[in-house]
């Protein structure tokens, strides 16, 4: 199994733990869009307790990559996603972004 496949499998397992059934093609597309950062320990994780990190997710992923600018929708999606992952200590960025994409209904961006 390649490193990429390993990351995707771990993200799928994490999604399963939070009750989300992952679409493998979408999960792979999101992982691929993250580039080599998915292999770096710090860059591959998201912290819901860090406002600076959440602002970075908002600016760099939600606004720049997905094109969502509605502050209300962004806040709601981040809160909902963090709530889903509340029992997960180390939130994988790939899994976290997958849930955000679903929350914001932006799957077509990765089609």
Image (spheres, rainbow, N blue to C red):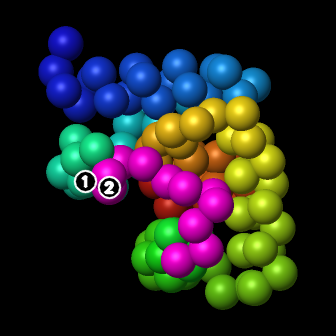
Please report whichever mark, 1 or 2, sits nearer to the chain's N-terminal start: 1
Taking the spot 19% from the left edge, 51% from the top edge, the residue there is: 36
Is residue 29 visible to the viewer in this orientation of the structure? Answer: no
Is residue 1 placed above or below 59 in the rendered structure?
A: above
> Disc 1 marks which residue?
37
Q: Is residue 68 magenta?
A: no
Q: Position of residue 14 (x, y in %)?
A: 56, 26
| Left or right placement of residue 45 versus residue 80 in this view | left
Q: Residue furthest top?
A: 1
Q: Where does the magenta region start and end?
A: 42-52
Is residue 44 placed above or below 48 in the rendered structure?
A: above
Nearer to us of marks 1 and 2 is: 2
What element does badge 1 sit on?
A: helix
What element does badge 2 sit on?
A: loop
Q: Position of residue 32 (x, y in %)?
A: 30, 47
| Left or right placement of residue 74 versus residue 95 in this view | right
Label 1, label 2: how many angstroms apart (C-alpha)?
6 Å
Taking the spot 43% from the left edge, 48% from the top edge, the residue there is: 45
| Left or right placement of residue 70 versus residue 57 in this view | right
Q: As rendered, which of 58 and 102 lies closer to the eye?
A: 58
Q: Position of residue 41 (x, y in %)?
A: 28, 44
Q: Quadrant of the N terminus?
A: top left
> Disc 2 marks which residue?
43
Counting every numbered tag in the picture gives 2
Q: Are marks 1 and 2 in contact (CB under 8 Å)?
A: yes
The quadrant where residue 104 appears? bottom right
The quadrant where residue 33 appears? bottom left
Mark 2 is surrounded, within 10 Å at the Cα level, by few (under 14), some (14 to 19) or many (20 or more) other residues, namely few
Chief secondary structure of the magenta portion? loop
| Left or right placement of residue 91 versus residue 102 in this view | left
């Amino acid at each position: 199994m390649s490193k990429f496949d390993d990351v995707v499998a771990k993200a799928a397992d994490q999604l399963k733990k939070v009750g989300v059934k992952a679409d493998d093609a979408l999960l792979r597309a999101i992982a691929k869009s993250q580039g080599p950062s998915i292999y770096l320990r710090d860059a591959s994780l998201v912290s819901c307790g860090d406002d600076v990190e959440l602002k970075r997710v908002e600016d760099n992923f939600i606004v720049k990559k997905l094109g969502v600018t509605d502050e209300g929708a962004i806040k709601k999606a981040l809160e909902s996603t963090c709530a889903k992952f509340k029992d997960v200590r180390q939130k994988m960025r790939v899994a976290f972004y997958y849930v955000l994409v679903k929350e914001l209904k932006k799957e077509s961006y990765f089609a």
